[in-house]
Image (cartoon, rainbow, N blue to C red):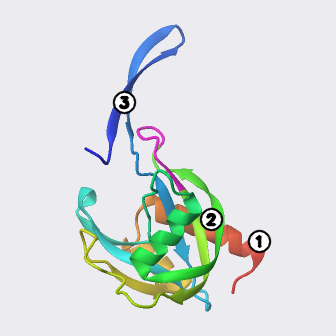
């Protein structure tokens, strides 16, 4: 599949050799935390087939080979939310499941948002239709409690966002 590859490595530890199998994804990319001027955060509602569930997440975009991480974040913001950002701030990197995957995600905070003109946010190029909505941090906390937000990337992004806003102030 173009989305993942399984790799087998021979590993040595304590004089023993073992085969270690893990997944590699060529489409690593940024997660974007789109923050409105009032501090609300934009999210997308998507069906995730492996867990057979519709969940709220921050937008995540696959990075093209020749593209920078920031450019991919800006493109993802435009494609999924039809927004442009005045500033994109790098917040950090995380591995979702380092025991079975080498896939990393970089986290970006998008601020100074403005709508893009001329086209619809959902032009039919995506496999699924995405619902988008802004939420306050209080609403997001309730959605975590209810299971509407349950993926490790979004939860990690919220941790990084909270840490950043604690150190740099809320809008």
For label 3, the residue is 7
- Dividing the picture into quadrants, the one containing residue 35 is bottom right
Foreground residue, 9 or 80? 80
Q: CA distance from mark 3 to mark 2?
A: 30 Å
Span of residues in magenta: 98-105
Q: Nearer the viewer, mark 3 or mark 2?
A: 3
Say few, some or many: other residues with alpha carbon within 10 Å of mark 3 (under 14 / 14 to 19 / 20 or more).
Answer: few
Q: Position of residue 31 (x, y in %)?
A: 50, 64
Q: Main secondary structure of the magenta part?
A: loop
Say few, some or many: other residues with alpha carbon within 10 Å of mark 2 (under 14 / 14 to 19 / 20 or more).
Answer: some
For label 2, the residue is 160
* N-terminal label among 3 and 1: 3
Q: CA distance from mark 3 to mark 1?
A: 40 Å
Residue at point 24% right, 68% down?
127
Q: Position of residue 150 (x, y in %)?
A: 40, 65
Please state if 40 lies on the left or on the right of 9 as rendered.
right
Residue at point 39% right, 45% down?
25
* N-terminal label among 3 and 2: 3
Please state if 44 lies on the left or on the right of 37 as rendered.
left
Residue at point 41% right, 16% down?
18
Evaluate if marks 2 and 1 touch, with contact meaning CB atoms under 8 Å apart: no
Residue at point 48% right, 41% down?
98
Q: CA distance from mark 2 to mark 1?
A: 11 Å
The N terminus lies in quadrant: top left
Q: Nearer the viewer, mark 3 or mark 1?
A: 3
Task: Verify whether residue 101 appears in magenta.
Answer: yes
Callout 1: SS: helix
Q: Position of residue 70 (x, y in %)?
A: 58, 64
Q: Position of residue 102 (x, y in %)?
A: 46, 41
Q: Is residue 58 visible?
A: no
Q: Which mark is residue 167?
A: 1
Callout 2: SS: helix
């Amino acid at each position: 599949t173009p989305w993942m590859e399984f790799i087998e490595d021979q590993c040595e530890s304590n004089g023993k050799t073992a085969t270690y199998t893990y997944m590699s994804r060529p489409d690593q990319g940024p997660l974007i935390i789109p923050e409105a001027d009032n501090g609300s955060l934009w999210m997308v509602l998507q069906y995730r087939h492996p867990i057979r569930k519709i969940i709220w997440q921050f937008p995540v975009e696959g990075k093209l080979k020749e593209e920078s991480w920031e450019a991919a974040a800006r493109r993802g913001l435009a494609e999924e939310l039809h927004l442009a950002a005045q500033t994109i701030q790098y917040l950090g990197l995380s591995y979702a499941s380092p025991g079975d995957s080498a896939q990393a995600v970089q986290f970006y905070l998008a601020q100074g948002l403005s709508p893009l003109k001329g086209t619809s946010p959902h032009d039919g190029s995506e496999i699924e239709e995405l619902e988008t909505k802004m939420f306050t941090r209080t609403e997001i906390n309730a959605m975590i409690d209810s299971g509407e937000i349950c993926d490790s990337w979004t939860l990690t992004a919220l941790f990084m966002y909270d840490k950043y806003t604690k150190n740099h102030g809320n809008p």
